Image (cartoon, rainbow, N blue to C red):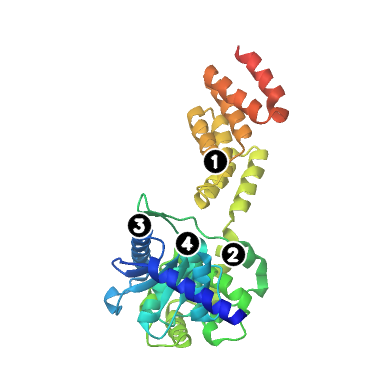
Amino acid sequence: MKRFGFSLLTFLLSVGIATSQVVVEGNRYEIKSDLGETESRALAKEMDRRFELYNGLFRFDPKRLPGKLKVRAFAEKEAYDAYLKTSLGETRENACYLHYSRFDRSELVVLKKDGGFFSHQAFIQFLRAFVPQPPLWIREGFAVVFEPLVYDSGRDSFSFEENLAWLETVKRWGVEAPSLAGILLSDENESINAEKLVPAAWAIASFLLNVDDEEYRRFLYEAFLLLKPELASGDNARLIADRGAVWIDLLRAQTDIESYLKSRRTFAELIEDGRAAYAAKNPKAAEKAFLAAAELKSSHYAPQYYLGLLAYEKKEYEVAEKRYKNALENGADEALCSFALGVNAAAAGKASEAREFLERAKTVAPSRYAVKVDELLVKLR
């Protein structure tokens, strides 16, 4: 009886999928979806833009593709689960790229969109469309690099905050870090710890993309050019490693990567660096750290607030006001920012604005600001 019930549910779900499904095509993608016509076309446009961005780095020849890449998008988890159970025998919580030997069967399966993991799998689909078996370090390393890529359909543009999620992890490894040679040949090297493979692959990709060295940059571009669609991943990895030995010394490169990683700071580290410099009355060092933090996470309130404090101390009141308001828009404590805006407005000679901001701080958090605000309001009369 239970088996019949499950079969009936699966049947009903499949009927629902069939009746609500739309098919739209972009330049490079075919979207089968039950998200509706408008969302489906928006997804097709986004995927085309992603293709262009990915290929701006890899420079594959689109003429090599035998057809359009496939995306299957679902609006509801039940339908998504049923589809994956049919294809995989199990379901997933996030986007899933299903790769088959036949190009026309391979597809990216999406439950609406789920942020970073969608971006991760979208990149893998792009890469494996051209090279079915790329080296693991290229596949996983660059997939992590592209995870934070967010598309704004209104502006038809991408925002990107560098992914440093693995930075602290790889910095902690020290002498226990996998060797560069080991990661480059990880497809045929079973001794590599699986838990370290993705972070180490990301470290190599991040290094090659950011280091200012012509030999490393040439190695990276040649690696992309050398990829062969007919080769297994291990053979592709060996081909690249052998050619790379002509351009770079692996031992020197290992040292250079370690130095690069040590020089990189996470967002949290940069904020702490800035706070420490601010407390030590070193405004230049503090500003440098907070600006770097703002570059890493442009939508985070913390660096904006601290940059506001620094601007206030330099009597750059308009700059400080913009920074404080930016911090407030990005989720900073309302009372804290309102108080800072009030003090800043008072220093700028804008008594009316100062009263308004200070009163707001007092209203939002009276236990923290009532006494301070009352003292300042007396001075503003």
Q: Amino acid at mark 1?
A: Gln
Residue corresponding to mark 2: 166
Mark closer to the chain start, 2 or 1: 2
Mark closer to the chain start, 4 or 1: 4
Asked if residue 219 shows in the view, the reply is: no
Q: Amino acid at mark 2?
A: Trp
Q: State the separation of the CA atoms marked 1 and 3.
A: 36 Å
Q: Quick one: SS at disc 3?
A: helix
Does 154 sit left or right of 11 as displayed?
left
Residue corresponding to mark 1: 304
Q: State the separation of the CA atoms marked 2 and 1.
A: 24 Å
Q: State the separation of the CA atoms marked 4 and 2.
A: 23 Å
Between residues 39 and 78, which one lies in front from this camera angle? 78
Q: Quick one: SS at disc 4?
A: loop
Mark closer to the chain start, 4 or 3: 3
In the picture shown, does residue 315 fall above or below 201? above
Q: Residues within 10 Å of mark 4 (few under 14, many from 20)?
A: some
Q: Position of residue 359 (x, y in %)?
A: 61, 23
Does 227 sit left or right of 120 as displayed?
left
Q: Nearer the viewer, mark 4 or mark 1?
A: 4
Q: Position of residue 158 (x, y in %)?
A: 40, 55
Q: Quick one: SS at disc 1?
A: helix
Q: State the separation of the CA atoms marked 4 and 1.
A: 29 Å
Asked if residue 325 shows in the view, the reply is: yes
Residue at 61% x, 28% y is 339
Residue corresponding to mark 3: 38
Residue corresponding to mark 4: 113
Q: Residues within 10 Å of mark 3 (few under 14, many from 20)?
A: few
Q: Nearer the viewer, mark 3 or mark 2?
A: 3
Residue at 64% x, 39% y is 278
